[in-house]
């Protein structure tokens, strides 16, 4: 069945790029809060020879269509999860490996519960089903912490949309991903970023974890304050049959702080 | 005296904090200014992680925004952050960071306390203004939509639209109570449709009863709203808030807002909901009163039947339909016999009672779609579409029989009967009459019955 017009519209809306080997197994890279598909800059290119690499921006980030931002739709992660399913439908992906960083990990979880047919595997990098502590659960943050983040967003309002001249000179060591991917530098609409921050950090998707049926791998880096190790372990315990892999990289962004290791670990999980 | 090179002195005591950190954020060099501001020694800061000086809110921003931007862009300017001092206080700073050729990060820190304080005040004022601006805009838009609405459906639609905008609800539904006391979806959507047992509206009823907003979430899977919680989960929703629509204590319906993630239902939220639902309830009551007034203008107050004005309109419409559909139309005209005597002997109260009883009897004697009206005094008319002479005869005779049966409050001696006249209009064989003409033929037929001895049915065809 050919993709519907609404499905192909998703490709423009989400600034979708399909690179690499057209006959390869699809890898869908999904970025988290605060950035855009650029966050995969040093990881995705390593799969171009043998995989079909799919990169995209969530609506509100990077080169996505800002006019598609519907407050009601994107007031929960389900709105983003629906977009992921539409992209996968439009590209008619089969047995896809979804690699979601941070909040995108939960979007992938929700999308796979909604319709698991196109998913072959979920790779969750630094996932957290709930950032705010509750009862006996430790997410790592309190409600006032999230308010503090929103204050920081407001204080840095200009920094979000201000476009800076590309400063990095001679990025010869960077594998080419494609001209169109550079220069956006996590551009984001500040008002949308604010709403996205609320949705990201105030969501509670703990209940959804046990409903995952797709084979899942949790990648946990060390000293990740945004998604601490205890949270990664919780996700692993809750998702039936999942595996937990501890990374040597530190911090919340292994795709930038340890791209070599992250790419190698992902590749190992694919074989 | 040790001679310190001027440039080194400038670095150590620069009017801004300067430090170098590794790619992973560990401080390898820092001047004297920054430790001075933060109340630490230089030695304490060397080897520590920059993130240590950030509280969780600032750290969230730093890790999710500043770090990726710096790594991808190589430089980030004028980032506003709060650093935590040794004594726990916050220092507002602006940060300029640049990645050096060896991969280390060079950072300049500027004290921005006063500026940040000022911006914070501005921001606070802006947020309050924004909140009240949304409130004012939503209330203004909805109230002007309510004022121009002429039906309950329009008001319900305007309410659903306003609530959806004001609360970013995933779905919004307005449910109004019908005459049977059931909730009917009048505008918006009901995402839980098909998941709840028919007629299940415990949450809506509870909200109306308590006269306050009620919220149910997927986490309420034990207790009175377990079914609702289950349905919410099935539809990928987190919670629903149910706001009663009440006017002077009497229930009208509810507004339900469905949310796909957990929400904090704070005071501005509930205030705005309450104001919206008050306005909507007011508007619905106004429309209902208007409808009641219209009904009164076209109906006889004593019997509730159509009045002469409405009857004339009904007959006109029936004639047109008869012509278009080529179906016969019968108009039955009746005048009570013996009514004047009862009115004169037993008073108007008894007379009114007779008229009410007769009206009720005529209504049960005609067919379901037939229209019945009070033409004046003790004259009644029944309009029977698609009724030829034969059908009309049986209806007219049924009316005559039922009127003649004993009436409550009328002594056995004073008999009330009906003189009935029927006009039959057959479009295929006759010219089209006006409503007045057709009624006057029926009236003439009624007089035939009267003069022939009352309590009978006579026919005249045009």
Image (cartoon, grey):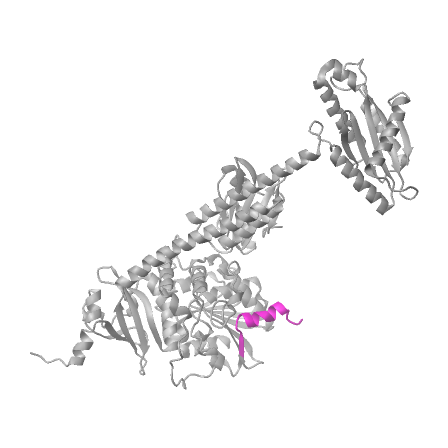
Q: In the visual, does A149 lie left or right of B253?
A: left
Q: Is B249 above or below relative to A130? A: above
Q: What residue is drawn where x is 64% and y is 36%?
A: B292
Using the rendered view, name the quadrant where residue B93 is placed. Answer: bottom left
Q: Position of residue B296 (x, y in %)?
A: 67, 33
Per the image, is A16 magenta?
A: yes
Q: In the visual, does B396 lie left or right of A30?
A: right
Q: What residue is drawn where x is 57% and y is 43%?
A: B201
Say which quadrant the C terminus of chain B sits in.
top right
Per the image, is A181 magenta?
A: no
Q: Position of residue B213 (x, y in %)?
A: 49, 43
Q: Position of residue B431 (x, y in %)?
A: 90, 42
Depth order, front residue of B77/B216 = B77
Depth order, front residue of B385/B433 = B433
| Observer able to see residue A212 | no
Q: What residue is drawn where x is 54% and y is 50%?
A: B230
| Observer able to see residue B124 | yes
Say which quadrant the N terminus of chain B sits in.
bottom left
Q: Is A24 above or below relative to B219? A: below
Q: Position of residue B298 (x, y in %)?
A: 70, 35
Depth order, front residue of A218/B180 = B180
First to last magenta residue range: A1-18
Q: Is A148 above or below relative to A56? A: above
Using the rendered view, name the quadrant where residue B10 is placed. Answer: bottom left
């Amino acid at each position: 069945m050919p993709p519907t017009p609404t499905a192909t519209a998703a490709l423009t809306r989400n600034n979708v790029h399909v690179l690499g080997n057209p006959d390869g197994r699809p890898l869908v890279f999904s970025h988290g809060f605060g950035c855009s598909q650029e966050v995969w800059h040093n990881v995705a290119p390593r799969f171009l020879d043998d995989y079909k690499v799919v990169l995209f921006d969530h609506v509100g980030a990077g080169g996505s269509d800002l006019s598609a931002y519907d407050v009601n739709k994107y007031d929960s992660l389900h709105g983003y999860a629906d977009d992921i399913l539409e992209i996968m439908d439009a590209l008619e992906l089969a047995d896809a490996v979804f690699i979601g960083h941070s909040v995108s990990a939960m979007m992938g979880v929700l999308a796979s519960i909604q319709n698991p047919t196109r998913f072959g595997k979920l790779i969750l990098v630094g996932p957290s089903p709930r950032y705010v502590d509750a009862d006996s659960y430790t997410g790592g943050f309190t409600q006032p912490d999230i308010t503090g983040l929103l204050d920081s967003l407001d204080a840095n309002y200009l920094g979000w949309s201000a476009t800076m001249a590309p400063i990095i000179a001679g990025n010869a060591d960077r594998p080419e991903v494609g001209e169109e991917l550079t220069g956006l530098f996590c551009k984001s609409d500040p008002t949308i970023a604010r709403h996205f921050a609320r949705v990201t950090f105030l969501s509670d998707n703990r209940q959804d974890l046990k409903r995952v049926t797709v084979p899942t791998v949790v990648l946990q880096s060390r000293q990740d304050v945004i998604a601490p190790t205890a949270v990664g372990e919780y996700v692993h315990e809750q998702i039936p049959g999942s595996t937990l892999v501890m990374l040597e990289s530190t911090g919340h962004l292994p795709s930038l702080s340890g791209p070599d290791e992250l790419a190698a670990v992902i590749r190992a999980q694919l074989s | 005296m040790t001679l310190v090179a001027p440039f080194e002195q400038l670095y150590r005591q620069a009017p801004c904090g300067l430090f170098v950190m590794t790619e992973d954020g560990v401080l390898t060099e820092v001047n004297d200014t920054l430790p001075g501001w933060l109340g630490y020694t230089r030695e304490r800061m060397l080897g520590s992680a920059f993130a240590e000086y950030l509280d969780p809110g600032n750290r969230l921003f730093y890790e999710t925004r500043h770090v990726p931007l710096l790594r991808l862009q190589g430089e980030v300017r004028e980032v506003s952050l709060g650093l935590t001092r040794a004594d726990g206080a916050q220092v507002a700073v602006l940060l300029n960071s640049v990645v050096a050729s060896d991969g280390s990060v060079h950072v300049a820190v500027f004290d921005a306390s006063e500026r940040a304080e000022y911006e914070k005040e501005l921001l606070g004022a802006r947020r309050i203004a924004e909140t009240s601006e949304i409130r004012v805009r939503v209330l203004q838009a909805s109230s002007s939509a309510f004022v121009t609405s002429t039906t309950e459906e329009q008001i319900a639609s305007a309410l659903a639209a306003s609530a959806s905008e004001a609360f970013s609800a995933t779905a919004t539904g307005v449910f109004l109570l019908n005459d049977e006391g059931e909730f009917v979806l009048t505008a918006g959507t009901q995402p839980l449709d098909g998941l709840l047992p028919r007629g299940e509206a415990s949450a809506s009823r509870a909200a109306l009863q308590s006269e306050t907003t009620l919220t149910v979430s997927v986490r309420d899977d034990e207790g009175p709203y377990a079914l609702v919680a289950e349905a919410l989960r099935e539809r990928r929703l987190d919670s629903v808030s149910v706001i009663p629509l009440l006017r002077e204590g009497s229930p009208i319906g509810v507004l339900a807002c469905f949310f796909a993630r957990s929400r904090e239902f704070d005071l501005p939220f509930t205030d705005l909901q309450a104001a919206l639902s008050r306005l909507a309830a007011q508007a619905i009551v106004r429309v209902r009163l208007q409808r009641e007034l219209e009904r009164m203008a076209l109906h006889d107050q004593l019997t509730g039947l159509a009045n002469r004005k409405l009857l004339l309109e009904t007959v006109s419409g029936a004639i047109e339909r008869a012509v278009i559909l080529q179906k016969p139309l019968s108009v039955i005209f009746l005048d009570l016999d013996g009514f004047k005597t009862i009115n004169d002997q037993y008073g108007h109260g008894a007379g009114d009672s007779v008229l009410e009883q007769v009206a009720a009897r005529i209504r049960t004697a005609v067919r379901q779609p037939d229209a019945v009206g009070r033409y004046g005094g003790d004259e009644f008319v029944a309009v029977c579409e698609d009724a030829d002479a034969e059908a009309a005869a049986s209806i007219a005779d049924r009316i005559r029989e039922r009127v003649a049966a004993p009436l409550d409050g009328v002594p056995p001696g004073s008999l009330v009967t009906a003189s009935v006249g029927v006009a039959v209009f057959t479009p295929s064989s006759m010219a089209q009459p006006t409503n007045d003409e057709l009624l006057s033929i029926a009236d003439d037929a009624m007089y035939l019955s009267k003069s022939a001895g009352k309590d009978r049915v006579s026919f005249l065809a045009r």
